[in-house]
Structure formats: C-alpha cells, structure tokens
Image (cartoon, coloured by chain):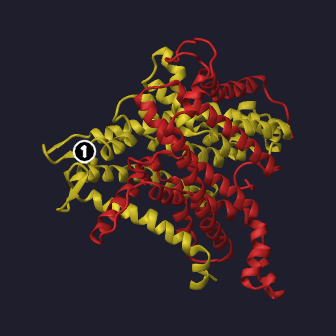
Amino acid sequence: MLTLRRFFATLGPGVLWLAMFLIVPIAIMFGYSLLTRTDLAQVGGPLTLESWGRVFGYDALFREWVPDNLRVLGRSVLIAGFSTLLCILMGYPLAFYIARQPARRKSFLLLLLIIPFWTNFLIRVYAWILILRPFDLVPSLTATFLGMVYAFLPFFVLPVYSSVEKVDWRLLEAAQDLGASPVKAFMAAVFPQTLPGLIAGILLTFIPALGTFVVSDILGGAKTALIGNLVQNQFGQAGDWPYGSALSFLLMGAVLVGLWLYARSAGQKGLEELI
Amino acid sequence: MIRRTHPALSAWAWLVYGFLYLPILVLIIFSFNDSKFGATWAGFTTKWYGVLLAREDVREALTNTLLVALSSTLISTVLGTLVGLGLWRYSTRFRLPLTFLLVTPIVIPDVVMGVSLLMFYSLVRGGLELTGWTFENGFWTVMFAHVTFQISYVALTVRSRLAGYDRSLEEAARDLGASSVQSFLRVILPLALPGVLAGALLAFTLSLDDFVVTYFTSGSGFRTLPVLIYTSVKKGVTPDINALSTLLVLFTVVAIVAANAIMRPRAGRGGDS
C-alpha cells in the first residue's frame, strides 16, 4: 500500500516537480489563451475567447470566417503524415533485415542505427543544407521531407525492430505449407505480429513531425508553414502570447487525440511500452 | 529460425544506411574544405578547427551545455529513480494517472513544453518583482526545464529494469533485520543500478541534444551549443560550424561505443527492451 509517508519518500518529489514545472505551466498557458494581447508580449484583461475563435478560424476584427489556421494544421498533418509514410517505406523492411541477421552482426547494425539517432538533432537537420544547397533545394518542401525523415527515421525503426524480433516465424511456414502465396502468407502470419511495433513507430514519428518547427524553419523556408512554426512565431516576432497559447492547445489536442486512440487499442501496457 | 534474407532486402537496407550516413560524411568532409562557401572543394585544410577553438562564444556555449547537462542529470536521476522505485514497489489506485503524468512530458510536442515554461517563468518573475526579488532566464530556468523532461525517462527506465523482480524482496530484507534505508541501499538499489545508469545516460544525452525547450527558456544571455548552432545557421552557413558539428558527431560516436561496451550484452534503452 502506498501511504502518505511512503509517497513522500519515493514518488512524491518527482510528482511534485512535474506538477510544478509541467502541469502548472500548462494551466497558466490555458489562462493566457483567455487573455488579450495588449502590447508586444504583454497581456491583459478582459477574459475573452477571441484567441480560441482565431484558432478555429473566426476573425473577430473583421467578423469573418478565415480558416487559415485549420489549413496550416491540415498541412502540418499532411506533411507529418507523408513523412511518416516515407519512414514506413524505408524503415519497415530495414527492421526485418536487422532482425534476421546473426547476433553479432545484429548488434553492430543496431549500433550503426543508433549513432545518427543520438547525434544532435540540429546537426542532423543542418547537414542537409550542405547536401541540398548545390541543387538549389534549400528552402523547399522536398528539403523539409528529407529532413523530417532523416530526423525521425530511427524513432520509427527501433520499436518496429523490437516487435519483428519477437515474430514467431513458424506461423509463416505453416501458412506456406497450407498453400498461401508468399505475400498472402506474410500478410496473414507476420504482419499482424508486427502491428504493435508498427503503431508505436508511427506515433513516435508522427507526433514529433507534427510539432516540429526546426526542420521547416531551417529547411523549408516559409515562416508559418507548419503549426509548430506558427506557434514559435507568436512567441517570437509576432509577440501574441494568448493566440500562441491557444494554438499550442490545438497542437497538444491533436497529439493527445492520437495517443488516446492508441491507448484505447493498446491499453496501459502499450502506453508504457511506447517509450 | 530462418536466416535467409532476400538480396533485394539487403540492398534496400544498405541504401537506408547510406541515407543515414551521407549527411554525416558530407559534414565531416566539408569541415576540411578550404573554401568559405562550402559548395565546391577548394583543397584540404584544418583551419576551421582553429577558427572554432578561438571563438569565445563557442567555448562559453560548450561550458553552458555541459553544466546544464550535468546538473539536470544529477537532479533528474535522483528524482526519477525514486519515482521508478515507488511505481514498482507500491500498488496504488493512482497508477494510471501516474503513468499518464510520466508519459506526458515525453509525448507533448517540445514546442508546447517550451512556450508553457516561458510563460510560467515570466509569471513567476512578475510575482517575485512585487517582493523586490528578480531573476533572469538563464542557467537555472533552462536546467529546471531539462529536469522536467528527464524525470520521466529515468523513472520509466528504472521501473522497466525492476519489472521482473518480486516486490517482496524488500520485505524479505526487512525480515532479516535490515532497516528500510539499509534494504534500499543494499538490496533494491543494486538491482536497479543498471536501469539507473541507463536512465542517467539517456537524460544526459537528451539535455545535450535539446534545442527547443532551451531556446524558449534561456533568455538572451545564455546559449547552449544547439542554440548557438541554430542562430549561426539562421545567419548563414559558416565552415567553422561544420567543424563544430564534426567534433560533436565524433563525441557522440565515442560515447555510444563506450556506453555499448559498458552495458554489454544488453545495449540500448532500459536494458530490458
């Protein structure tokens, strides 16, 4: 049993830290989203839903419906989604290749995969400037995709690999013995076994790709291309914290809905295995 | 176990590895390029490394980065280990909310964490000014922010390390006459130690790597290496940044190979995955 005394001896300090530096700031962010911008990065009363209106496309100043933000969110979802798709195409076969090597070679290949993964994120993004600049591809959408896939691919491969590792290959043989074509046998006997890893990999790629502003900022050019850039801009040049706060909630909401859908299908264990 | 891999699968795998290493190779090559505008090869030089080492701001950013990483790792390892142990040791009906609390810093976009902390600090500063105290965003604000995202990784790594052990181990130690502190130090901590070390290593790397949260919480006078690289890249690419990046890549490779050697045979995160 967890008594109060035990709580403060173990979980307590960490939980209080997270309450203070995570939950309170998010609550404050919610408060800011209800305020009005008075001057650059200054906020004041009265409480208003104006920023939330703007997030969902209602421009209070001109009293009209301008769904630009929803378009940015839609574009962010599309770009993150397409980047994730590229990660699947590149990474799913790679996970199988690694998983089916002899043990020594396997750990070498994993090490080779982890090195770029642990290399500084900004350096990984920056390196693409060097490659793409001679082709006049910086800034461009192509550069953004390349940077996204490059930055997030190892996040995808590692969870997929750990579920491919556990695949029971006897099922594949059984399916083939029963006359299934190789493709059909794979889809029926192997693919479902890799599904937990695949879903975890998709989430671990899609979520950071949806929230990033660094990749599109350095490789993509346009300032408000993605929702992450739009948020950053509100806390930088635009200096509109209430609007930025409301946009952050939109971004966070999009992420949490995705996770909720995942948690519902995978349960608590799945949620914990995600990390 | 079938060890056969289709030639097409091997070819694909090596193409992907090529994709992963191409930018790193290009970076290293261009850090030795004797040309101010790196697109063409103008001969071999090591002068950019000299330029880099002479830069005061680079040395300062390196010091800042290491100070933040070391202190935040220390705090988060202590707090995270305790959380991991508590989660493993005690059953509570708050299990699901606790898991959610721990997963949140990992899954929310880092830009959201960054801007919410920015507003939090500015509000705290406003409150403190009323009492005559004040502070600037800098080392402390960045360090506290890093601890916030590190705790979860440490806690979950420690708990996954302990997952296989029976919770009654501690009771057994107590029955044999150990005090609660003794049983913690002599029985539980040694069991958890590989997880604690793996968690600390992960936390340290996350701190070194972080740009977004640092960017929003650092104010104008305090820069870490990722923030310095970002501002340099925004101003235009200079070859000494290639040299800096190359050094950081080499550092990463050495650190990973060393960590891998220490934690053999179970490489990677958590030790059990």
Q: Residue furthest left?
A: A62
Please state the horizontal and vertical placement of residue A46, each as a whole percent of the image: 17, 62
Please state the horizontal and vertical placement of residue B73, each as a whole percent of the image: 60, 58
Is residue A143 depicted above or below B147 in this figure?
above
Instruction: Residue at 52% x, 15% y: name it.
Output: B39
Please state the horizontal and vertical placement of residue A210, each as a whole percent of the image: 45, 42
Residue labelled with disc 1: A57
Q: Is residue A21 visible?
A: yes
Say whether residue A223 is left or right of residue B26.
Answer: left
Is residue B195 depicted above or below A135 in this figure?
below
Is residue B211 depicted above or below B159 in this figure?
above
Q: In the rendered image, which quarter contains the N terminus of chain B? A: top right
Image quadrant of residue A35? bottom left
Please state the horizontal and vertical placement of residue B221, each as a whole percent of the image: 40, 48
Chain B, chosen colour in render: red
> Numbered disc 1: what chain?
A
Instruction: Residue at 78% x, 23% y: name it.
Output: B7
Chain A, chosen colour in render: yellow
